[in-house]
Amino acid sequence: MPKSIIMKATIYCQSCSMPLHNEESKGTEKDFSKNDEYCRFCYKEGAFTNPEMTLKEMKIHVKTQMLKMNFPESAIQNTLKKLPELKRWKNKVRKYELEEGDFA
Ligand SMILES: [Zn+2]
């Protein structure tokens, strides 16, 4: 596969897993440059829009949004399963697992 195709692979928000298709969907830094890891809903002007949000709350949020967009249940479950692997949650997962148990 040519390198250019690999470079164009879709990147996903490392908080909510929304695909970052274009510059407009990316979050912004304080100097209004784009952040390549988070979407504009999660990250704005250098900070998370909802810094207190837990992984559990994010799962509920993502599920609600996907249901609104008529995603099939299997796609929703797949997305929810991937959330704990994202950068924002990775280091916190163990703690939440112990505190909150399985949530889907
Ligand atoms: Zn996001």
Image (spheres, helix red, strand yellow):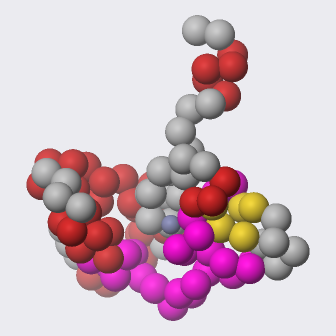
Check the image and report above or below for 24 versus 49: above
Q: Is residue 2 above or below residue 70?
A: above
- Tell me the magenta residue range: 36-60
Q: Residue drawn 34% across and 82% down?
A: 57
User: Which of the two residues, 35 or 89, is positioned nearer the viewer here?
Assistant: 35
Is residue 59 visible in the rendered structure shown here? no
> Quadrant location of residue 26?
bottom right
Residue sitting farthest toward the left: 73
Q: What quarter of the picture does the C terminus occupy?
A: bottom left
Q: Nearer the viewer, residue 12 or 71?
A: 71
Question: Where residue 60 sits: x, y (%)?
Answer: 27, 77
Residue 7 painted magenta: no
Is residue 47 visible to the viewer in this orientation of the structure?
yes
Answer whether residue 40 is magenta in the image: yes
Judge from the rendering whether residue 28 lies leftward or rightward of residue 85; answer left or right: right
- Whole-percent x and y of residue 80? 29, 60
Q: In this view, which residue lies farthest toward the right?
A: 31
Relative to 25, 95 lies left or right:
left
Q: Residue furthest top?
A: 1
Q: Residue at x 61, y 23 (%)?
A: 6
